[in-house]
Image (cartoon, rainbow, N blue to C red):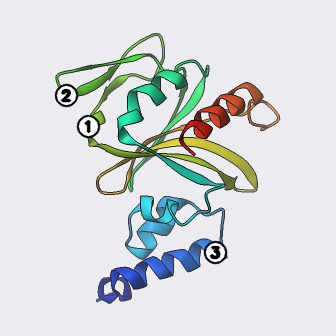
Amino acid sequence: MTAQATASAEERLAAARAALAAKPDGVIEAVARQHGVASRDVLAMLPPSEAVFAPASAFADIWQDMTGWGEILFIVNTPDIVLECHGTLPAGSSAQGWFNVHGDSPIGGHIKADNCREIGFVDRTFHGRRSCSVQFYNAAGEAMFKVFVRRDAERQLLPQQTARFEALRARYA
């Protein structure tokens, strides 16, 4: 039996908190998996200056705002794959229990929006650089997907997208 398997929930959270304190720009999912806690729980350990949360009821409004950001980075991170896709977010519509996304973009498909329980606005250092993202979490506390502000050729966040992110985040902070 591993130490993680025998540790209480409080002990696992404390260990995750210590790991995050030791490496503040660590990968949230990696810290969560290492300590047997949900990614959302690790994200909640960040100070409010780095992570704030909006209710799931804001899903469609937040998505609609992001359709005007231009080309973004869309990420799905599971234990088996980190899938990255660059493109604009097409407008979505709800039908038959799905939030359907189709348009002139490589980003498209069907999202079970009803599974979203909370939306995080994350503004933190990652690998030594500022990173801004909107992260959609399910009931298990795992990220369904993330939308990141893009970078320019000099690896700087795009100013117009950063301003849009900050304005949207401020509505829910």
Residue at numbered disc 2: 97
Which residue sits at x=59%, y=39%? Answer: 169
List x then y, in percent, for residue 167. Answer: 65, 32
Secondary structure of the residue carrying tag 2 is loop
Is 158 positioned to the left or the right of 137 in the image? right
Identify residue type, mark 1: Asp
Identify residue type, mark 2: Gly
Residue at numbered disc 1: 114
List x then y, in percent, for residue 10. Answer: 39, 82
Secondary structure of the residue carrying tag 3 is helix
Secondary structure of the residue carrying tag 1 is helix
**Which tag, 1 or 3, sits closer to the chain's start?**
3
Which residue sits at x=44%, y=77%? Answer: 13
Residue at numbered disc 3: 21
Q: Alpha-carbon distance for marks 1 and 3?
A: 33 Å
Identify residue type, mark 3: Ala
Residue sitting at the far left: 96
List x then y, in percent, for residue 110. Answer: 29, 26
Query: Which quadrant is home to the N terminus?
Result: bottom left
